[in-house]
Image (spheres, rainbow, N blue to C red):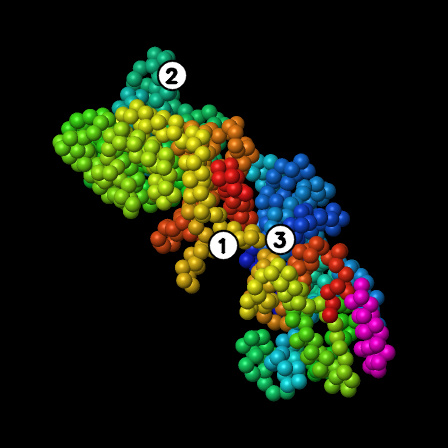
Amino acid sequence: MDITELQPITNFIKTLPPFDQLSDPMISHCCQSLSIVYYSKNERFVHVDNNEPQLYIVRSGAFEVTTENGELIDRISDGQYFGFSGMLSGEKVVNKVHILEDGLIYQLPLNSFNHLRASSQIFDRFFNQAFAKRIRNQGDITSNKINTGRISSLISEKMVSIDGASTIQQAAVLMSAKRVSSLIVIDNKHIAGIITDRDLRDRILAKGLSSETIIKTVMTNNPITVSKDALIFEAMLLMSEKNIHHLPIVANNQPISMLTSTDIMRNQSSQPLLLIGQIGRQKSIEKLVIVSQQLPALLQNLITSEAKAQEIGRILTLVTDALTKRLLFIGEQQLGKAPMQFCWLAFGSQARQDQAAGADQDNALLLEHTTDTSSELYFKKLAEVVCDGLNQCGFPYCPGNIMATNPKWRCSLQQWKAQFSQWISAPQPQALLNSTIFFDMRPIYGEVSLFSQLQNKILQQTKNNDIFLAALTRNATQQIAPLGFFKNFVIERDGSEVKGIDLKHKGLALINDIARIYALANGIPAVNSKQRLTALIGTHGINTEDIHNLMDAAEFIAHKRLINQSSQYEQGVPLSNYLLPDSLSSLARHHLKEAFKVINDSQTGIKLKFLRQF
Amino acid sequence: MLHSYFMKIHFNYRYWRCRNLLLNDYYKALEPLLELSIEKAPLLALDLEMTGLDAKKDQIISIGLIPITNGEIKLNKGQHKLLKITGSVGQSATIHGVLDKDLQQALPLNEAILWLLKEAKGHILVAHHAPLDLSFIEQALMQQTTQKCRLFAIDTMRIEHKRLAHRQQIIKEGDLRLGSCRSRYNLPNYEAHNALVDALSCAELLLAQLSRMGGAGNVKVSELIC
């Protein structure tokens, strides 16, 4: 048969690495020998025949490779492979392949596989590397968060170097002038050694040598260096293996800069800390606005470094908190000391510490007692400084006007207590729907004891309050996760335009609702959904497995949303919560369905518990 | 059971009536396959490209065949033949991509039908919307043998129709097209269309449908053939 007539198959194979490196005749030879099999979830496992090993090329569907004992080794989806380990090692296959989603597999027999390996070095190397990686991954698939950045991205300052014939005195002067802890010692344009702070102490002062000692005699000779193209990870490894803190960076055998362990630490975790530090030092709103322009880049960085969605939300919230605090500080500087004690409150996502890009502000002022005209004016002005400032820094005004600038949400502890009592004791469904946001509340600045008094009062009233919890539950179950009866995605449309799956309102918001209801029912003061769920472990009414499932679902959906928004950001389209399911791999699709199913099950759970509905 | 009994009678009847030797052989080889499970039975997926939809007026342009054995489709067993036609491929060229110039090494219709019968012998035919394809083959056979005959096949479209109706789903226009059926089983969308690719698409669809029925081992040929 002429394989060119099966173009869809050859076209698919041709796009897959390492097949994309093969010549057309080789591709054609390989496609000739393929056989096609459909695997269904009902069969649960792919039956791998040890006498007839094959390379399984996944065309569609999702699969999981585990060891005999059920430890996860690999997850496989469209365009990926399994079955190569047995063919490479020649050993009997003991790993199991679970079928997660129905799918089609193209199977390449052993002799064709070996033929391709023999004729193409790239092909051979690809599968050997995949095999090696597989072994490393055994039972540890989650720890692959190696930082893949390159050292060149860390080079910030110009190299500080000194000639080998100089004296220690000169070196110390240079180090203190340039504010560095180490110097590269140059001899004939080449790197001869390094000298560090510590050397000055241990090798000179401690030994009583004079400050006129020549550097060459005391420096570390032929230091270990690292190429500017090496991975940051490799540098970390070198430092910890050799127990050193300084690595000269070289390019073309020429030293170009020094890499210190502090540089790496800063790169690894401290970017947000740096930003928060910067925020805390600014003295004017204009400067704060400039500093906060780094936020989108920071978010992008965090996403590409594969931080957990939960952590990213926390970090963004920390930045918002810092901005709010600094604005309040600036406001107090401008307006003078506050006429009474107060507490600045945040609601919604900032309170829950799960802010996303482009989140709007929800805040209020909690005052010690009722205001008179002058104190009212003071807090009005203070609120304006903060809310306007936040708006300029990229946190738009709340469309529902839940902000401290609104006199309604700038009231005394007594008034707040009364307001909450009204929501809790006579829950009107619509009024309650609009006020759920207030039940996620966190103090940001000011007198925390005011907040604690309010929160204690609220929790006392909500705990085991059947009528209130039933009303909350009724509201929280009006939306359901977008899964149809046959477990297919329900996609939202706007006229003929396909909008996709709403990951926020049909996903994360529902999990937040569920966590909130359980937390209020049990009098748990935590506000962050994960913390609420964690605090619920061991309480009555929800079992631990369901809690863990909900946490995993929240993390997965939040992560998908971040990735989606990050790609929207890169494409320059407006950020939204809508995900197009076509953009997902079968595996991601499977996980997303599972996550939605967890939400639906939990909703059934709260209906049963708080509404007595089946 | 009853269905299978009637089918057997029907085959015997066809067998005795039929004077054409090749056709005779075909029917004879078919009968023992009826009682087999689909898994064990040799299947042959078939697709025709035609100049139109009317077997009496329109002509076959190409035939694609690919066998399914033990639940596996081997790509190197696929076959594709172009047929000589009178006149031009005309409008349908835009659908099949078969151009007049491709048809120069094509087989005449009678040779192609003999080849098809030989390949099909001992196999159960599988096609998507089988009655259409079979009607063209039956028409061609009638011209050659001057005798009316009827062929049998497993129709993936009929299976899908039954399945959707069974789930009480509303069947909309286009829901039963090969591509739409395939997407319900997470099968990829094959871009290019020729008789062989469509035969392969149909074969894959049958494998997927069988797995939803609880595996090819549990379904008998006689339950699906018509």
Viewer-closest of A216 and A298: A298
**Looking at numbered disc 1 in the image, what kind of residue is underneath it?**
Val
Point out the frontmost of discs 3 and 2: 3
The location of residue B59, given as percent across then percent down, is: 65, 82
Q: Which mark is residue A490?
A: 1
Q: Main secondary structure of the magenta part?
A: helix
Nearer-N-terminus badge (3/2)? 3
Q: Which chain hosts label 2?
A: A
> From which residue to which does the magenta span run?
B1-27
Dot 3 and dot 1 residues touching (CB under 8 Å): no
* Residue A319 in sight from this viewpoint: no
Instruction: Give the Cα separation between the discs numbered 1 and 2.
Output: 69 Å
- SS category of the residue bearing label 1: loop
**Amino acid, disc 2:** Asp
- Tell me the residue that label 2 is attached to: A202
In the rendered image, which quarter contains the C terminus of chain A?
A: top right
Circle 3/circle 2 CB separation < 8 Å: no
Residue A124, position as x, y percentages in the image: 62, 49
Residue at position x 74%, y 72% in the image: B152
User: The numbered mark 3 sits on a residue in which chain?
Assistant: A
**Residue A150: x and y, percent?**
42, 40
Report the residue marked by disc 3. Answer: A102
User: Which residue is farthest left?
Assistant: A374
Q: Answer few, some or many: residues within 10 Å of disc 3's Cα (few below 14, many 20 plus, some between 14 and 19).
A: many
Residue A74 located within the stretch drawn in magenta: no
User: In the displayed structure, does residue A566 sit left or right of residue A543?
Assistant: left
